[in-house]
Amino acid sequence: AEFVIQSEASEQIAEALNILRSWNTEWNPKYFMTDYSEAEYLALKTAFSDIKIFLCNFHREQAWERWVKDSKHGLSKEEAQHLLHMLRTLANETQMCHFVSHLNALKESNVWIKHHSV
């Protein structure tokens, strides 16, 4: 299904989701994939309280790329590339023990320590 709303506000998205659900009362998804949008996340949680929301890889990567390139964060080109590498390593890890190890490495990295916005 698709819907068109005037603005991407969580209340409007939740209303549209509830209308769709009223047309199909059995519709109660367990999982949903979305782009990097707080409004969509909040709307999905409002409409389906037990839902597990996944972030689309493309939009996750796009958000990271935009964030590291934003001058307000003060990352050098080398720091940005290093941070992206560490984040991608975390995102692609499939084993929890390795994930924790990579997360600890990120938190101990110079870019993490130097830049509080990371």
Image (cartoon, grey):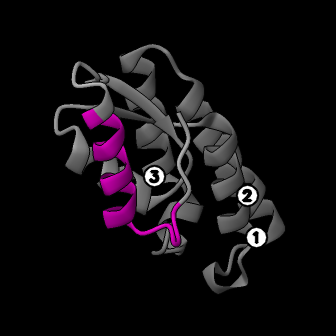
Where does residue 37 sit, x and y in percent of width and height? 49, 58
Say which residue label 3 marks. 108
Q: Residues within 10 Å of mark 3 (few under 14, many from 20)?
A: few
The residue at the point 45 percent across, 52 percent down is: 108
Which residue appears farthest toward the right when viewing the image? 77
Which of pointers 3 and 2 lies earlier in the amino acid sequence?
Answer: 2
**Which structural element holds mark 1?**
helix
Per the image, label 3 sits on a secondary structure element best described as helix
Question: Disc 3 marks which amino acid?
Answer: Glu
Please give the residue where the numbered disc 2 appears in the rendered image.
65
Q: Do the residues labelled 2 and 1 touch (CB within 8 Å)?
A: yes
| Label 3 vs 1, first from the N-terminus | 1
Mark pair 2, 1: CA separation: 6 Å
Q: Is residue 86 above or below residue 75?
A: above
Which residue is most to the left?
49
Residue 79: where, in percent of width, then height?
Answer: 72, 63
Residue that label 1 marks: 69
For the record, the magenta segment spans 5-22
Q: Which of 84 and 17 is in front in this view?
A: 17
In the displayed orientation, state which residue is furthest to the front: 23
**Alpha carbons under labels 3 and 2: distance apart:** 21 Å
